Image (cartoon, grey):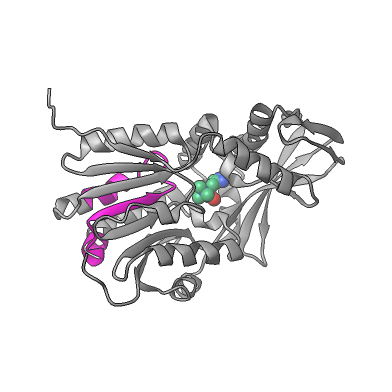
Amino acid sequence: MTTEVCEPVVTVALDPGWAVAGLVDDVRRGLAQVPRSLSPKWLYDDRGSLLFDAITRLPEYYPTEREREILGARAGEIARASGATTVVELGSGTSDKTRTLLDAFASTGQLERFIPVDVSEGILRQAAADISREYAGVTVHAVVGDFTQHLEILPAEGRRIVVFLGGTIGNLDPHERAQFLRSLSATLDPGESVLLGTDLVKDLDRVVAAYDDSQGVTAEFVRNSLRVVNRELDADFDVDSFSYVPYWDPREERMDLRLRTEKPQHVCIPGAELEIDLAAGEEIRIEISSKFRIEGIRSELSAVGLDVVESWTDEAGDFALTLAVRAGVPTPR
Ligand code: AVJ
């Protein structure tokens, strides 16, 4: 038995009850008005996280494999170009793909610290413990938090690279995205960097198929958000009477994932002190998944002082990883 393995430090940025309070706010803001919506944050309870994992293994869902391909080919370059000693991962989940990146940073001997950030405390604790065991000598400091709200509490040790993979930034609308990128840039010191994964605009049929799989896993994943509301807020959505309607929004170049009730429903949501009437055919938007163009990514990043070092795509040109560095003169720490 070795005694050298350090337990990971876990900082809980969210106060207990945060999840329910946040859900109540979102439900009041999103479900009480027409058009109705719910934040995709609530898709990831334990069951939702498992369903998402299953999505990443579906034949139709290409982003995960494509991003893994780019990471496999470019991790070394990314490690060298960033010169980072600290890897911060936003929305890390199981930190599965991150291992490819951590391996590259570890093999150059530059990796000192790994800071995974996620709202799902259980999954985060597990990932932090696993990684701390697998990477001897690397300090793991997990932060339970919401990347849209807790950027400023991120530990500022070493020279950081903040990685945000999977195309999750596509969940934000353009306004939210600009706000997020601005605060991300503001928390970084000049010379620190960002690695951003984005799904790219491509043949429509393939995009739609990725969100409308033949096994119905995605439909169940999206429906699960209402089960979360039922459980957490004691609501009575008749979840099974909702059909899943994914559609492509050509103007915004994004998938728009909705649930449609096939019958009228009166829904009580006691935990939010809310009752709503849904007409037959009424829809609730659960998630958007924006698709990007390389030029657009570059200009959104440079608009907030993040200069693109390079964008890499997979062989097929389906997905992009972009490395950008915070502009300005680095200050020694
Ligand atoms: C985790 C946000 C990147 O948008 O592709 C997959 C979520 N939703 N299938 C995506 C998702 C339905 C996924 N992200």
Q: Is 256 positioned to the left or the right of 269 in the image?
A: left
Quadrant of the frame with the C terminus = bottom left
Residue 219, by quadrant, is top right
**Residue at horizontal 35 percent and vertical 38 percent from the top:** 10
Q: Is residue 309 visible?
A: no
Q: Is residue 98 magenta?
A: yes
**Residue at image coords 37%, 33%:** 125
Of all residues, the one furthest to the top in this rendering is: 1
Q: Which of the pair 181/145 is nearer the observer? A: 145
Image quarter (top left, top right, bottom left or bottom right) of the N terminus? top left
Q: Nearer the viewer, residue 331 or 148?
A: 331
Estimate the x, y position of residue 277 in percent, counting from the top left.
86, 39
Residue 245 locus on image (x, y percent): 71, 45
What's the residue at 24%, 66% (across, down)? Answer: 81
Left or right of 182 in this view: 281: right
| Residue 258, position as x, y percentages in the image | 70, 46
Q: Nearer the viewer, residue 125 or 244?
A: 125
Left/right placement of residue 75 relative to residue 58 reads left
Report if residue 333 is visible in the image. Answer: yes
State which quadrant residue 328 falls in: bottom left
Q: Residue at x 13, y 32 (%)?
A: 4
Q: Is residue 138 above or below residue 45?
A: below
Residue 302, x across and y down, in percent: 44, 75
User: Disc count in the image?
Assistant: 0
Residue closest to the eye, 54 or 95: 95
- Residue 144 highlighted magenta (yes or no): no
The residues colored magenta run: 77-104
